[in-house]
């Protein structure tokens, strides 16, 4: 069993190193930090969405912003789309591919930001949310993997993790999420650092 642990950590390290040495990806992460900071500075909100583990990461992203990351500060406007009653209602009445789109239509405003997470880039309900975001003039950021899928072309900013398996991709997504939150806090609450 020890060899499984060693191999798993080795793969994770290789993905992290490939990401860290890719100048284009680091520049995109910086752009994400600036856009998110300016979204909050301008009094707007951020929404996030994904499926399965990516939905968990979307919720984690939102709660770190509305709660706290490292130290106390005022809450920032963030919401993970897809509460259970909304999911069951909309998927029953309109179809599962509409669940994020409908909630974004009800809550989103021009100038907000939508973060979509998808390891494949092919999640239909995230794709529909991105199409709606563009119509509403909401900036879109996609955290993806593999070849980026359809979301790569739909996103205003697409960050594609250089990995093929969902576990390695999601490990990088959470690292990106934590780091973008830290950069926003450093910009908006420098006294915390």
Image (tube, rainbow, N blue to C red):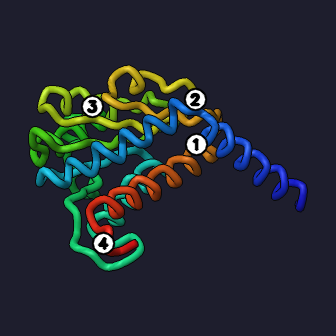
Element on which disc 2 rests: loop
Decide which of tag 1 and tag 4 comes sooner along the chain.
4
Q: Residues within 10 Å of mark 3 (few under 14, many from 20)?
A: many
Report the Cα–Cα distance between label 2 and label 4. 32 Å
Q: CB under 8 Å between callouts 1 and 2?
A: yes
Return the mark for residue 169: 1
Decide which of tag 4 and tag 3 comes sooner along the chain.
4
Q: Which residue is mark 4?
A: 67
Residue toward you, 171 or 192: 192
Report the Cα–Cα distance between label 3 and label 1. 20 Å
Location of residue 191 with respect to 54 vertically, above or below: below
Residue at the (33%, 35%) spot, across then down = 126
Report the Cα–Cα distance between label 4 and label 3. 26 Å
Residue toward you, 147 or 83: 147
Residue at the (29%, 54%) spot, across then down = 80
Decide which of tag 2 and tag 4 comes sooner along the chain.
4
Q: Which residue is mark 2?
A: 146
Return the mark for residue 68: none
Q: Position of residue 123 (x, y in %)?
A: 41, 32
In the image: residue 4, left or right of residue 78: right
Location of residue 156 with respect to 14 vertically, above or below: above
Return the mark for residue 130: 3
Decide which of tag 1 and tag 2 comes sooner along the chain.
2
């Amino acid at each position: 069993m020890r060899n499984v642990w060693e191999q798993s950590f080795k793969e994770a390290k290789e993905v992290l190193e490939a990401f860290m040495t890719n100048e284009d990806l680091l520049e995109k992460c910086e752009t994400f930090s600036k856009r998110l900071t300016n979204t909050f500075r301008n009094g707007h909100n951020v929404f996030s969405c994904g499926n399965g583990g990516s939905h968990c990461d979307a919720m984690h992203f939102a709660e770190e912003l509305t709660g706290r990351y490292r130290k106390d500060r005022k809450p920032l406007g963030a919401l993970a789309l897809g509460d259970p009653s909304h999911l069951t209602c909309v998927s029953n009445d309109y179809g599962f591919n509409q669940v994020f789109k409908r909630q974004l239509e009800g809550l989103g405003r021009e100038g907000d930001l939508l973060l979509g997470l998808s390891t494949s880039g092919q999640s239909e309900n995230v794709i529909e949310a991105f199409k709606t975001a563009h119509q509403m003039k909401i900036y879109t950021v996609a955290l993806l993997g593999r070849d980026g899928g359809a979301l790569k072309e739909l996103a205003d900013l697409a960050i594609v993790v250089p990995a093929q398996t969902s576990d390695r991709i999601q490990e990088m997504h959470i690292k990106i999420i934590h780091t973008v939150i830290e950069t926003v806090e450093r910009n908006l609450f420098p006294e915390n650092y």
